[in-house]
Image (cartoon, rainbow, N blue to C red):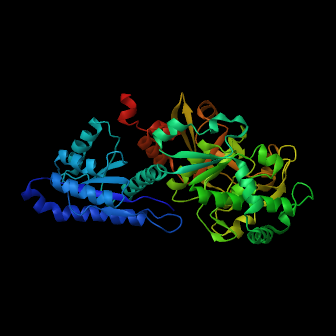
Amino acid sequence: MRTVPIGLVILSDERPHVYNTNNELNMRVVNRWAEIIRKGMLNQDGTTAQVVVGSEPITSPRVAQKVGEELRRAGCRVIVMCYNIWNFPFLAWPFLNTVGRDLPILSLSNNNGQFPGNVGLLASDGALRQAGIRTHRIVGEIDDPKVHQQVFDWLRAAEARATIHNEVFGLYGGHSMGMETGFFHLVPIIKSLGCNTQQIDQLALVKLMEKSVDEAEVEKAFKWFGKMLGDRILYDGKMLTPETLKTQIRLYIAMRMLNEEKGFDFCGLKGQRELTENICLGDVAEMVMNDPYDWNGPKEPFVCATEADAFAAITMQLLKYISGGLPSLFMDVRLYLPELDMWDWCNSGNHSSWYASQSWDPAENYKKIHFHPALEFYFKAGGASVEFDAAAGQMTFARMGLWDDKPFMAIVKGESVELPAAQSKAINNQTDPTWPHVHAKLQCSFDEFLALFPSNHVMGTMGDQVRALTYLCEISGITPIVFGPEGAKRIAPIWERVH
């Protein structure tokens, strides 16, 4: 998974009789943190965080400039400033002015009476905040697993922000059906996250499908789906035929080709109405794009948002980085079931098949999947709709939105629930039984969700990612709107309170 290098540095005292006594200890501390981060920040693909440690404690302006240059040349885009003893606060500036003061910054200290790193932290970090630099602070013992997890959550957030900062969103066809909540609102996105977009007409995909797609790979993929699904490909001779399924495969291959040619980091497919009424339904292509595998073997999930929902795609990309590379879910906010205090979230396509069983083996996930004929009423060109119920597990749901052109992110903890087959079928029949479903319980009320949620589309990932997403928003200047009890516990940072 794509990440950026993390730079660690430790600040110290400028008096020789002090730093000559403490330099060895300080370097042990910062190198210990580097090892904790490397071991604790494992990604889903087995890679880990790249950590660069400053060669010596910062004891003078020249050393600060030297170490800053080391980290800058190593490409560090995330900075952890460690404190283990009292330090001279002004030394933070020659370091930051060299490495770059616009990077995510964590101030990290012990809580020790003999070695008062937290005193140096508050003095130095306070100086940074006086100048309007957003920072975060973590104070705790280096052997405490809870402190480790807090550091990991901040680093996941900082890595997500720093990685997406220079990425490009491939926008195939523009926002679908006039859904303005999914439009790529250029200025607030660039100001908060830095990423940009290039819009490509869907005709480019169609021409690639006609002229440039390798038909041998189409046949390979078609046989793979046949092996995975067997008679669960519900051909009807009209909407879903071998040829309409092959057309969907060609769409995936064409998107993959154009994403690589254009240098896109994530994408969105408009689909409705040009493709869905004239070429094919995008469901299979979007699912496989988001999957961690295809017929060629394991791959990195490539975020693709249906209906070219740009805020959905951005949220999904951030969730991918926050989770260490898991596929991200895209759902319609479809039906609330008050008797169960539960939601049925479903949409045509875009659910990664990984969520069927949460397995890295596609065969395990596909055991639960059916390909249904596309609904002719909406999708006249035909193809397969993908259907399954998401497996149970703790989840975090989120969505970026705008209030008066100012970005915010709705965040809520919840879970995906597995239901008895008969109950699941009855619920799914109330919406659409040929689409993928997440039966979601949220740690907030229906009224709170309805009052605050920004869109008809909601994103999700596995695990409790609330703190990491909150850090991400605060780093980026995005207001986090955390629902339920987690929101009541949040301490708003100083820059929100002052402004």
Q: Where is residue 445 in the image (x, y as percent from the top left)?
A: 61, 36
Q: Which residue is drawn at 24% across and 47% down?
A: 121
Q: Where is residue 298 in the image (x, y as percent from the top left)?
A: 62, 69
Q: Residue at x 32, y 36 (%)?
A: 132
- Decide: is 185 above or below 268: above
Q: Which of 453 and 218 is in front in this view?
A: 218
Q: Quadrant of residue 70?
A: bottom left
Q: Where is residue 275 in the image (x, y as percent from the top left)?
A: 78, 48
| Side of 15 relative to 2 (left or right) | left
| Side of 254 relative to 461 (left or right) | right
Image quadrant where one finds the C terminus:
top left
Q: Can residue 414 be seen in this view?
A: no
Q: In which quarter of the image is residue 41?
A: bottom left
Q: Where is residue 476 in the image (x, y as percent from the top left)?
A: 44, 42
Q: Which of 119 and 187 is in front in this view?
A: 187
| Side of 447 relative to 115 (left or right) | right
Which residue occupies the extreme left position in the image?
A: 17
Q: Nearer the viewer, residue 331 or 215?
A: 215
Q: Which residue is drawn at 48% across and 44% down?
A: 193
Q: Nearer the viewer, residue 299 or 364?
A: 299
Total marks in image: 0
Q: Can residue 132 be seen in this view?
A: yes
| Side of 120 relative to 41 (left or right) | left
Q: Residue at x 65, y 34 (%)?
A: 180
Q: Quadrant of residue 387?
A: bottom right
